Image (tube, coloured by chain):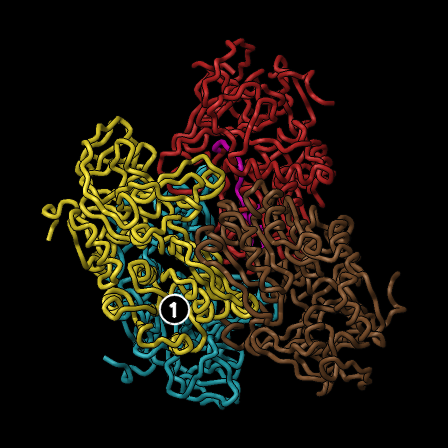
Chain colours: A yellow, B brown, C cyan, D red
């Protein structure tokens, strides 16, 4: 992506890998809302970090270690790596030295000097290969890799980065005190606003950790249908039920008229926060997750929607590095019963990157992926 | 208060006290924002409970047990009570049977059938004495009393109800994980929006539990001056600095340019929530506390103000019953070093109740109290 | 049970049900370790409460509402009840007035004046029917019932009381901060010491809420085999591997040599705590759950086993009332995929109660139940 | 310290400071229990790390930056440093790459490859100056410094490392849910076992964060007297009351017969854990803090002391790096009202290091410090 709206196929030299770095042969790279935003010219990332074009897009990645520096320490849980291992590269590279990195635990995107593969790391400087829509990806010494457990195919592993957002969100929501009905606990009713990959991944995570009822509110019907197959107990089509009051009514009916225990905002639409607060029960929790580009404000009534409900709102910006490892463990655990790989509905070769982006923008599919080496894939 | 705007002095018969109830001879009753709202005709309380006039106002109460039923079990921590004990009546009477009471821990005002002394319990039915602006207050069998520790004067105990709101708010804010800089921890910087009794009580609580820097934003100067004497390290006068951007700048300068660890909204003004979110550091917490009447909405930017900051927002509606006991322990503990009784700037006899209300509305003083039996007070 | 070791069949009059009480026609009642202890004469319950013989045993109950007082408010989440509803009676009746009841949230067995159906409530006083090994059970006005969701058979609902112990334990373990690897989080490795109903229920709960690997350590093989069918990924037979060092080795091998994230002690054997601490990873959590009778002490090394590991130990005594409702929601949710009803391996009629107890003591089965009206059961 | 029991004065060359490191001119270095243990030959630190003699002891340090590499990033909250700034060096140097460093938040001593200034970093290799009992201390590029706030004298700053242990312990204890009486909350009663610097620092922290009642159990009387002057409301002299039952009685009397809300074990004596559990109220928390050398086991009764009490036990091994900054903020905050510098009862020059150690071992004083450049001190 040489500038917003312009995709171009380029060749870079095969890099030399020093002892503390690595090279990954790419298998698959997903398209995220952020990619769509950059393509449209919306390039200010959280924390004010900007995209410095040209970039190689692709931050939802999975591939195979092609070269591994002899002194490298790259695995996110310090497990042994070797050439041929399947890995998911952690897309953010944090400085480890700023106030946020040193004082708090682990949200990569909060690092004041955070740089991102596929988003803010320009490919103009050698060794260039700083994004997933490429045959190879260069792993910097300060970057991290998460080893993919045996048996997890690339179609499932490519979802790791997205799934780790709800992994962190639900973990945060758990910590107040679920026994006292403050924060998410097993058996709870979850409403998800947004039926894209992030929304459905919240549904998947909710199902993995014991939510009783999972309601996804979004569109189009094709996405909702897939959601019902994978994780949703109920869906509400916002194209069919365009009146927010009726959607609220539906959620109340599905929750003994109390409201949801947890609502996750995954639509990236500010007004969804306003509606989400109305859908909460007394003492409920609203997660605001993953809408990366500033889309403006929405009216919130502090007294009625927050205070008198004893509600909590939690921002979930990206994820921690170690949540990749946790998410991969869950993917492996639920391989048979929760077919996460079905989220991948469209595959394109690198040459078709622009078409891939347009398909993602059209919302006709769910997870659209770019497969640098289509032939090597198992299907 | 026979209806909004109309105060009237009335005599009720001295009640008969059954074995499971009690009678308290009132010493002092504070005026809360809720009283002002009801006087102005704003009578919808959180949860939609309404005021049924006539009422005897007064829910920030302290008095002496005059009669005690032999079988009563009224102390909030099950301590022994006897005639002559100083007590603070818990102002809410919860049903103990609704979904909220049975499933969650303890926010009285969240009870679906909550009734409140001085606010929603009408005095038209016998034994009538359901508010603090009276010589005696009747304690229902299902109500609770908090015993005042020895040495705590009524001028300090009358603040208990207000102080228990930040007691609960800071306790909630502590629970995520202060070590990982999520939630309030000792040594943190606290900004309070609002310089009335609720705001200053948040400052007092912050000081009691080890905040490093306490900044109170509000007006008028007389209140800020008192706040500085009791708990505030810095104050920002919103009459002098009317530009929100400059107020934000001031807070940033006082917090190493990071923003506050915790902001408490105690002004009851919706826009304060918008500004409060801007004042938060990455990972900070916003408490929305005690603004009881619906004052409308305010624009919130989910991406910039919540998500990309990893912020948390916590509603704090009233308090738990047991927080009265905790607050009283802290009042006693800090009797010498944190002169909470200085908050009481104006006293009026019951006959002067209307003037008391108008004084409270004028914001010229801090805590305005009604003293049913002025002569018995120690001063 | 007229005294330890002596079971006797008795007839009591059919009770009159006042407006605030109810009568439940029993379907099934499980046998708990506590029942075995009382039969052996070990009758001091937690908190020092004693059994006052004679009693009708049975506190893991499920039945059908036969009569319902018109003014009763018995459902634990305030849902509407009617005659014919299947319900699980909450086995503890708390006073609601002691220091513990008023100051803290919800552990029934911590109530200072707690009385228990089937354990400490004697049947010598009318209306006598205070235990589950009877045709009918009398529900006191201050007791509670949890409504069983549609479709949950009595064989599954009878496990509710046991399952609510790990429901509370895992909820407690979640609250510190799972993202920082303090406390249980999804994807974690769980070791359970003890393969009886309580142990297997911990395995079931761990599976319901997203544990990655579940290891059950216990005996005999028949129980471990059943555990593997329902929830265990690995089992360690303590009869075959009697050396604790070798069992520790096995757990380390199954956890990348780090130790388990969470260990639950469900064997009721003090030494299991010592071994459990050795099995924990740095920062891990040990639950000590449900071993109701004082079985003596075990050596613990504070520096090596707690401090230098940054470990946490959490006592889980019984459960909260509302956890029955949460557990029932999970049972219904996992009806198809986690066949909890398979735990019931033996059924006896009331006339065979003593044989039922001896079978439970023999450990040859898993959950042994008494079925007052065998014919009415669905199978 | 060339080997256990042998102290020797040595000269090392003045080091060359590369761009990413620094040199600190020492002002003061405290003596910790660990120093005493090493002197006695007890040299296995938590995690199994051993002391490699010779070492320069001293890990409770404060000094002035003498040289600062131009590219160094050493401040723990990323604040600007310059030559002449007073700093407290963080005593542990973590790898940042092991499983613990990457997966969890911040307990330095849990790092699998942790090395410690003054404890495990040998001085035999250049630049040698890896401990505080020296004129200068060399700050490695991967080490950290905490800037001392203006106005905090070295006598107070030297306590930072010790104080940061209770800073972390109380923060951990806060996180479950203080409102539900699980975990430490303001207004609570705290019992501390041990009257040495670690114990009194727990008392100081408890006072800073709003404990109502602080009871210190220990000896000798001189230490208890100092404790009462600084933070203790009550002390129990274990030499005078040698019967544990009577000490327990005393604590019960001081806590309305309920037991303490929180007990902190700071004596380093295993049996104290057994007694501490008996002193806890239902739902209370026991911190096991800072006893660094394995001193053996103690009997614990899981059913009576943990389970039936719903108790929690939390290990607190050392501290996080950022807790140094938090502790220093609290020291500055309470400079006037909580005279932490009074803990320093004895000062010795480096030449007197052996006498300093023997004085510390004698327990006649409280905090014994070594002052490399006595003349430069302000007194």
**Foreground pick, D254 / A369:** A369
| Quadrant in which residue D155 is drawn | top right
Residue B137, image x, y percentages = 76, 77
Foreground pick, C153 / C80? C80
Q: Residue at x 42, y 73 (%)?
A: C57
Residue C162 can be seen in this image? no
Question: In the structure shown, which secondary structural element does the residue marked by tag 1 occupy?
Answer: strand
B63 drawn magenta: no
> In this rendering, would B356 be left or right of C291?
right
Which portion, as a residue range, is magenta? D274-294
Please state the horizontal and vertical placement of residue A299, each as a whole percent of the image.
50, 66
Q: Can you identify the residue that label 1 sits on?
A: A189
Q: Please give left or right for residue C91 compared with residue D258 in the image.
A: left
Q: Residue at x 57, y 58 (%)?
A: B287
What percent of the width, then of the height, locates residue A345?
A: 19, 59
In magenta segment, residue D280: yes
Asked if residue C204 lies left or right of residue C379, the reply is: right
């Amino acid at each position: 992506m040489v500038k917003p709206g312009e995709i171009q196929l380029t060749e870079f030299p095969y890099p030399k890998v020093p002892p503390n770095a690595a090279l990954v042969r790419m298998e698959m790279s997903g398209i995220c809302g952020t990619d769509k935003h950059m393509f449209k010219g919306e390039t200010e990332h959280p924390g004010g970090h900007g995209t410095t074009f040209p970039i190689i897009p692709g931050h939802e990645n999975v591939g195979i270690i092609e070269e591994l520096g002899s002194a490298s320490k790259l695995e996110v849980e310090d497990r042994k790596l070797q050439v041929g291992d399947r890995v998911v590269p952690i897309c953010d590279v944090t400085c480890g030295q700023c106030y946020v990195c040193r004082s708090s635990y682990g949200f990569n995107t909060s690092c004041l000097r955070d740089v991102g593969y596929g988003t803010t790391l320009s490919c103009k400087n050698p060794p260039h290969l700083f994004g997933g829509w490429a045959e190879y990806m260069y792993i910097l010494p300060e970057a991290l890799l998460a080893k993919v457990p045996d048996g997890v195919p690339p179609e499932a592993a490519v979802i790791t980065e997205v799934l780790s957002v709800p992994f962190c969100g639900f973990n945060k929501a758990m910590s107040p005190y679920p026994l006292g009905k403050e924060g998410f606990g097993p058996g709870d009713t979850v409403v998800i606003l947004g039926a894209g990959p992030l929304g459905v991944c919240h549904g998947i995570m909710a199902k993995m950790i014991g939510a009783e009822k999972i309601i996804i509110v979004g569109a189009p019907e094709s996405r909702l249908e897939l959601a019902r197959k994978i994780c949703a107990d109920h869906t509400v089509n916002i194209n069919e039920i365009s009146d927010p009051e009726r959607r609220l009514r539906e959620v109340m009916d599905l929750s003994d008229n109390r409201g949801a225990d947890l609502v996750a905002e995954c639509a990236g639409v500010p007004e969804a926060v306003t509606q989400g607060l109305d859908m909460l029960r007394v003492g409920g929790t609203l997660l605001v997750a993953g809408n990366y580009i500033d889309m403006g404000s929405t009216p919130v009534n502090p007294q009625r929607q927050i205070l008198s409900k004893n509600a909590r709102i939690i921002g979930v910006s990206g994820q921690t590095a170690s949540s990749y490892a946790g998410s991969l463990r869950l993917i492996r655990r639920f391989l048979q019963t929760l077919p996460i790989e079905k989220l991948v509905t469209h595959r394109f070769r690198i040459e078709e990157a622009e078409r891939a982006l347009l398909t993602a923008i059209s919302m006709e599919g769910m997870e659209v992926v770019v497969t640098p080496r289509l032939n090597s894939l198992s299907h």
